[in-house]
Amino acid sequence: MRRSACKVTSCLSGLPAVWSRKVHNTCYQNSHLVSYRILHHHFEDFKPCSYISFIAIMGLHMNARCEVYPRAPDVKRFPVPDDKVDWAVKFPEYKPTDFTSKSVSSQPVWADNPDPCEIKFNCVDESLKVDRRCFKNGQPHSYAIDEKGYPINPSGRTGLKGRGSLGRWGPNHAADPIVTRWKRDSKGNVVQKDGKNVLQFVAVKRTDGGGWALPGGMVNPGENKTATLIREFGEEALNSLEKSEKQIEEMKKSMADFFKDGETVYKGYVDDPRNTDNSWMETKAMNFHDSNGECVGKFSLHAGDDAAEVQWMDIDHSLKLYASHIDFIKATVGRLNAHW
């Protein structure tokens, strides 16, 4: 059975009343204008469905509107100008490209069924142990479902419908560990620039051509995101996949305490070039800082899994990283009061 049009919980739910007020279909949150409208939404034309715009809160996504879809040179997005990203802005000529990669449409175990109508969105899907919630400011917030049962990207139009290369309809959750240490000279002294300590982080070079990135990855069904962080760091940065079982266990034991004390830097939507109107990336980025360099700071780094190269990389304003990773690094620099 097809889903009927559904109403969506306000993006302002759960906030103190003094922070939000509704005036003539407009909401204000912390003095920032947030569109709040009931829209007609469908890809070919507009039909009844609720929609709440998060654009004013999250900002415009840019990577998610890249002209050519990653690793699909023949797939081009329908052009979406900045002023038409928000679903609240009428765009009757909008005809997004429909694309789902063969690797996804072949229905591997990590991908949803082609028809999303039987999927329970905006909740944890207990049957599959898949988290289908969207997060903003670290808290769950509902996204809209159109009249055909397709989830709608809360950050607006991308120029592409379908799932692209993402397995899940709606949010696809990842975890990104930001592992840092202070840069030190040959004598072991912390290096400073402009009066602030220079920070280094573990960076991996992606094999898919995406450039340098954090050593993150997708959350497996039923897996705790913190467990994902540890697993992905081991697979991509320490290449635990090529170690013996005994070595892997020793490595996990040495990292156990270190990875207990991480600080969440960000949890929510990611401006990723793989995003579509119906599927998008979300992540939990956590900083694990080795202040004295005696734990992971002394580990030998070896690329593995999805990484071509791995290294301790200096952090400064000239960094160029994959997707929204540079924003997570900036937040970490601020948290540790490091050089930028």
Image: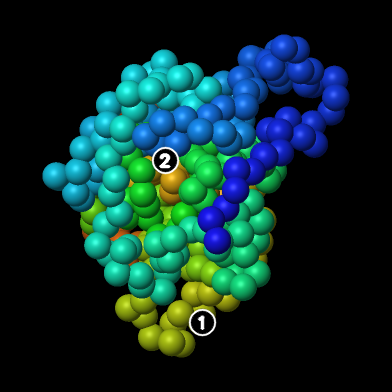
30 or 168: nearer the eye?
168
Residue, disc 2: 277
The answer for how far apart the CA atoms under marks 1 and 2 are is 41 Å
Q: Which mark is residue 249?
A: 1
Question: What residue do we see at 19% from left, 49% from top?
Answer: 72
Question: What residue do we see at 61% from left, 34% from top?
Answer: 50
- Secondary element under disc 1, as helix, strand or loop, is helix
Q: Is residue 262 visible?
A: no
Residue type, mark 1 in image: Glu
Where residue 325 appears, as percent x and y from the top left, is 43, 40
Residue furthest out toward the right: 17
Question: What residue do we see at 49% from left, 48% from top?
Answer: 148
Where residue 313 appears, as percent x and y from the top left, is 36, 44
Crowding at mark 2 (Cα within 10 Å: few <14, some 14-19, many 20+): many
- Secondary element under disc 2, as helix, strand or loop, is loop
Q: Is residue 99 above or below residue 232?
A: above
